[in-house]
């Protein structure tokens, strides 16, 4: 391989390693990932789903997003993946973390008081953000899959 090609391959390997996210360990009792599973009495369910643009996924800064609630891991979401967790009602600190050439994170307060709260997470070129939505997208079942496997 010529020197310019070798240099380019080396740069791409280093950039890929720098942008890879560590898969986050799930630190909550695992809720059923079936969307129609009943919410346990006294709990609320938060459904996090990564709605990042699929065409940009894999581009620098558009990879998986780690989701934490009150500094405890919920899961790592690739584009078009979801994870749900059952918690006590109340306002939660939701932290999103993504590796780019550095680490990008943001923290948001999410009020979880109804039986199910839907939280859309998404990447932008220089940031990550959330949006609490009233319902899941119409084509959710066809386009999204669980990030956690049922045990």
Image (cartoon, rainbow, N blue to C red):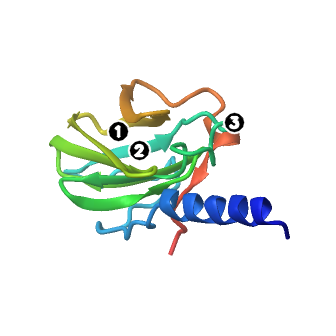
Residue at the extreme front: 3
Locate residue 26: give its quadrant.
Answer: bottom left
Viewed as shown, does residue 2 lie left or right of 135? right
Query: In this orientation, which residue lies closer to the viewer: 41 or 60?
Result: 60
As drawn, the label of residue 47 is 2
Q: Is residue 38 visible?
A: no
The residue pinned by badge 3 equals 55
User: Residue 30 versus residue 123: which sits nearer the camera?
Assistant: 123
Count of number-bearing discs: 3
Give me the residue at 63% from left, 48% from top. Answer: 58
Closer to viewer: mark 2 or mark 1:
2
Q: Which-is-in-front pick, marks 3 and 1?
A: 3
Figure check: 117 above or below 104: above
**Which residue carries the number 1 mark?**
116
State if disc 1 and disc 2 touch (CB < 8 Å). Answer: yes
Q: Is residue 141 left or right of residue 24?
A: right
Q: Residue at 56%, 64% (x, y): give it.
A: 14
Q: Nearer the viewer, residue 78 or 112?
A: 78
Extreme residue in the left direction? 90
> Could you say where residue 15 lies in the image, as x and y percent from the top left?
56, 58
> Which badge, 2 or 1, comes first in the chain's sequence?
2
Marks 3, 2: nearer the viewer: 3
Sequence-first disc among 3 and 2: 2
């Amino acid at each position: 391989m010529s020197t310019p090609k070798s240099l380019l391959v080396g740069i791409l390997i280093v950039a890929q390693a720098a942008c890879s996210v560590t898969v986050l360990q799930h630190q909550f009792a695992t809720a059923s990932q079936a969307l129609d599973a009943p919410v346990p009495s006294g709990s609320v369910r938060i459904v996090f789903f990564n709605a990042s643009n699929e065409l940009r996924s894999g581009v620098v800064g558009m990879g998986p997003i780690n989701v934490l609630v009150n500094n405890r891991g919920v899961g790592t979401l690739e584009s078009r993946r979801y994870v749900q967790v059952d918690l006590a009602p109340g306002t939660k600190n939701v932290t999103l973390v993504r590796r780019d050439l550095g680490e990008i994170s943001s923290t948001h307060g999410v009020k979880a008081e109804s039986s199910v709260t839907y939280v859309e997470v998404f990447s932008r070129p220089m940031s990550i953000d959330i949006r609490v939505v009233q319902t899941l997208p119409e084509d959710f079942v066809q386009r999204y899959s669980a990030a956690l496997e049922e045990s």
